[in-house]
Image (cartoon, rainbow, N blue to C red):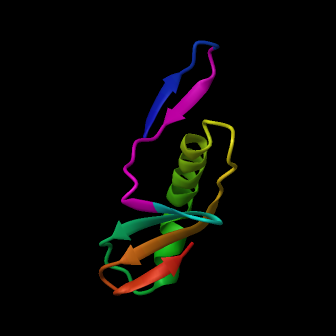
Amino acid sequence: TQKTESPAGEDLTLIQGIIDVFWVEEDGIVVLDYKTDRVKSGAELAVRYAAQLKLYAEALERICNQDGERRLRVKERLLYSFRLGEVIAV
């Protein structure tokens, strides 16, 4: 995360991240991020990474809808916990 100022003088926060995997299905986009955190529950991971996955979803929707023809939306945001060995919906 990096704070900067826009040309208009507004404060902006730049966030850098890499989407691990996503795929497009007929009814929308699914985004999945792998996690190795030592946690006791999927709920803990979901809370911890909800904002990150929301930003990934927004970025994917912008990228996938640049042509203006098809209106793709992210239909699922998922985490895969290596520690728990499970997929968590966020």
- Above or below — where is 70 with respect to 26? above
x, y percent for residue 43: 52, 81
x, y percent for residue 51: 56, 57
x, y percent for residue 1: 43, 41
Residue drawn at (57%, 54%) of the image: 57
Residue drawn at (49%, 67%) of the image: 48
For this rendering, which residue is in front, 73 or 32?
A: 73
Residue drawn at (58%, 69%) of the image: 76
The image quarter in which residue 34 lies: bottom left
Residue drawn at (48%, 31%) of the image: 3
Which residue in the rendered view is the most extreme toward the top? Answer: 7
For this rendering, which residue is in front, 29 or 67?
A: 67
- Above or below — where is 1 with respect to 40? above
For this rendering, which residue is in front, 82 or 13?
A: 82
Question: Which segment did they paint magenta?
Answer: 9-22
- Above or below — where is 63 with respect to 33? above
